[in-house]
Every structure is written in structure tokens, then in C-alpha cells.
Image: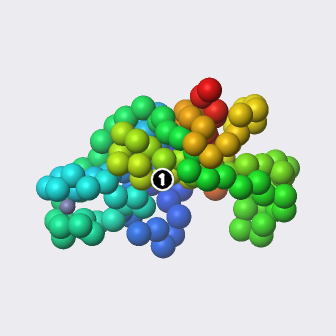
Amino acid sequence: MAYSFEQHKITGAIEADDEYWRGLEDGKFQLSRCSDCKTWTWPAHFRCGHCGCWEMEWVEMEPKGKIFTYTRSRYAFDRVLERKDDVPYVSVVAEIPEAGNIRVMGVLAGPEEGLAIGAPVRGRILPPSPKTKNYPSIVWELDL
Ligand SMILES: [Zn+2]
């Protein structure tokens, strides 16, 4: 059976970020901004925190950024036990210059040589899996 974002949606999600997940599902990296004042907003919201506009737009872009910060998990936390076989793993918060330096989190994939704050990264979209609670996901790879 084909994957369906709607079918696997987490109960209680606020839905403002649905387009992000739908985009990943289609292999697209897209982020939201206010359609009036163009302020980038992440996490996504229904309303612009800058000007109060209720219209948001989604802009597709290359998943390229630089590492704002990162951390290495050495423990299988209860809420992400699906990742217990990956421990230790690195989570990255990447700043996206094309989107006003808003920050998007993802797990680091590939070689770690050169891992540092400020290092350039490129995102790769992965299909839904039990490891990501059946959501599509983005992983960051160093792009040195
Ligand atoms: Zn605005």
C-alpha cells in the first residue's frame, strides 16, 4: 500500500506545518513565510508573528544550510526508542540562509569529518519509516 501522509498524521498535530511534511513526502524541501511581509516562520504557524497576517506561503528551495549547533545522543530516549540501534547519533540544527536563517533540525548522516558549528550541510530527504514514526524526514550531510 502506498504511503499517505494523511493516514499517518500524528494525532494532536497543530497542522500549520502539514505542507512541510507533504513536501518532504513529494521529495521537496519547502519552508513557510508570510505572504504579506515575507517574514520566514519556523516552526510553521497559521499567523505571522511579525505583521499579524493570516496568509502563509510555502517556498520550495534547495535543502542547503550551515550548522548552527549540533549534539550527540548517547542514550536511547523513551520517546525515540526507534533510534536505539543508531546510538550514538548526531542531531543537527541547520540554519537555512535562503530562508532568513531559520533553523531546521535533522539527524546527521554520512561521514562526520569536518563536523563543526558553521560547517555547510546539504539535506537529503528520506521516505517514511518506523524509525521516523512514519513521517518522511530530512537528514543533513556535511557539504565541505
Ligand atoms: Zn507578516
The quadrant in which the C terminus is found is top right
The quadrant in which the N terminus is found is top right
Taking the image as four quarters, which one is ligand 1 found in? bottom left
CB of residue at label 1: within 8 Å of ligand 1? no
Q: Residue at x 77, y 69 (%)?
A: 78
Q: Where is residue 67? Give x, y as percent.
A: 58, 45
Q: Nearer the viewer, residue 85 or 120?
A: 120
In the picture, residue 37 is in which quadrant?
A: bottom left
The local secondary structure at tag 1 comes to strand
Q: Residue at x 73, y 62 (%)?
A: 80
Q: Which residue is drawn at 26% across and 56% down?
A: 39
- Number of numbered callouts drawn: 1
The answer to whether 73 appears left or right of 48 in the picture is right
Q: Which residue is drawn at 78% across and 61% down?
A: 81
Q: Name the residue under label 1.
A: 103
Q: Where is residue 21? Give x, y as percent.
A: 45, 49
* Amino acid at dot 1: Arg
